[in-house]
Amino acid sequence: MVKLTFYGGVREIGGNKILLEDDSGKIFLDFGYPYSKYRIFYEEYLKPRPGAGLLDLVVMGLLPQLEGIYRTDLDTENLWQQFRRAEHYRKLEDIDGVLLTHAHLDHSGHISFLREAIPVYATATTAFIAKAVQDSGKSAFDQQVCYFTPRMEECLQGWKQGAYVASSSGDRQRRFCVSDKLELSEEAEKFWGKTTRRKKLDSQPLEDIGKCGFNLRCLPVDHSIPGACSWGIETSSGWVIYSGDLRLHGRHGKLTESMTKEAAQLHPRALILEGTNVDKEANVSEQEVYENAFKAIDDARGLVIADFPPRDVNRLLTFLQIARDTKRKLTILPRDAYLLKTMRLLESGIPDIAQ
């Protein structure tokens, strides 16, 4: 009989961590960064201590008390002794993987702490975006989704306790299994196999989702970031559909409509549906954003500054089109340019910002 345990994502935005267990195995549905919980303890210049390994995160309830799923370079025997009598503690082994719906950190960020042997199942676009975001960011130890820097415990003479310090041996890439593995171009293969950082990368080739112990269906949906999908998982009790983040008012709303039809044909036993904006009766479409922003910018004189959420690729493309239509030049951050360049490796329809 299938069992679902929600370790995050309930009555909060993001932070999704859902464990599905069945006769076929155990698999997580997303493993996200819980922003709202972090804000209780931390702020911009106050972060979890990398030198403490998993300690701060587990003590403060930012990571579930699940011994056996986390990286061994951050996990020690002494850590779990204090939690083994706790109500929600559990020893969990033999995880088949994480079904990642998209590359936003509130759904992917805490993959950073999982054992490297646990594969991540995603679309190729999600895998490439996750790597591009990490390549061009600060790569804090709690945001190392695609590859991570191993740490080792070091205790200097006179110290009361050791600290986990970054190893100089190089970064290790996680196993990514993609639903749409195509013949990658030489440039795409090169991108996946190296980083922009000086450290050496122990890279892992992209694999196919067919290696998963579960029968899976990857169902593309529309979201503010490309590559988003819902997942269908066949269990002994029937199909379970996990929506991830989705919308109908974006550039590719028909993908979401197609997903609902395909999911219905599976006659699912359970539907796990994102509900952040479920009470809204209507949304502003991306076309309306274009029309309103175009009018404001076309009427303006001099510099125009536009602000929108990071990694909202569709909004970035909207303003790129407006800049071209109003004969302006769009100036963007280097990390946004790197992200668009990365996406062009897989999607030829992404505009070349150099032109």
Image: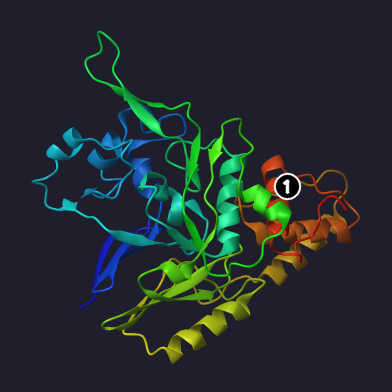
Determine crowd level at label 1: few under 14, some 14-19, many 20+ residues with C-alpha closer than 10 A: some
Q: Residue at x 23, y 39 (%)?
A: 59
Disc 1, SS: helix
Q: Residue at x 42, y 40 (%)?
A: 142
Residue 79 lies, with reference to residue 10, above or below; the image says: above
Please state if 212 lies on the left or on the right of 128 as rendered. Answer: left
Closer-to-camera residue (100/6): 100
On the question of residue 216 being in view, the answer is yes
Find disc 1 in the rendering and name its residue. 337
Q: Residue at x 56, y 59 (%)?
A: 126
Residue at the extreme left:
85
Percent from the top left, x then y, of residue 2?
Answer: 24, 76
Q: How many marks?
A: 1
Residue 3 lies, with reference to residue 63, above or below; the image says: below
- Quarter holding the N terminus is bottom left
Percent from the top left, x then y, of residue 85?
Answer: 8, 46
Percent from the top left, x then y, of residue 95?
Answer: 30, 59
Residue type at numbered disc 1: Ala
Residue at the extreme top:
158
Percent from the top left, x then y, of residue 173?
Answer: 49, 45
Q: Residue at x 44, y 49 (%)?
A: 109
Closer-to-camera residue (249/108): 108
On the question of residue 11 being in view, the answer is no
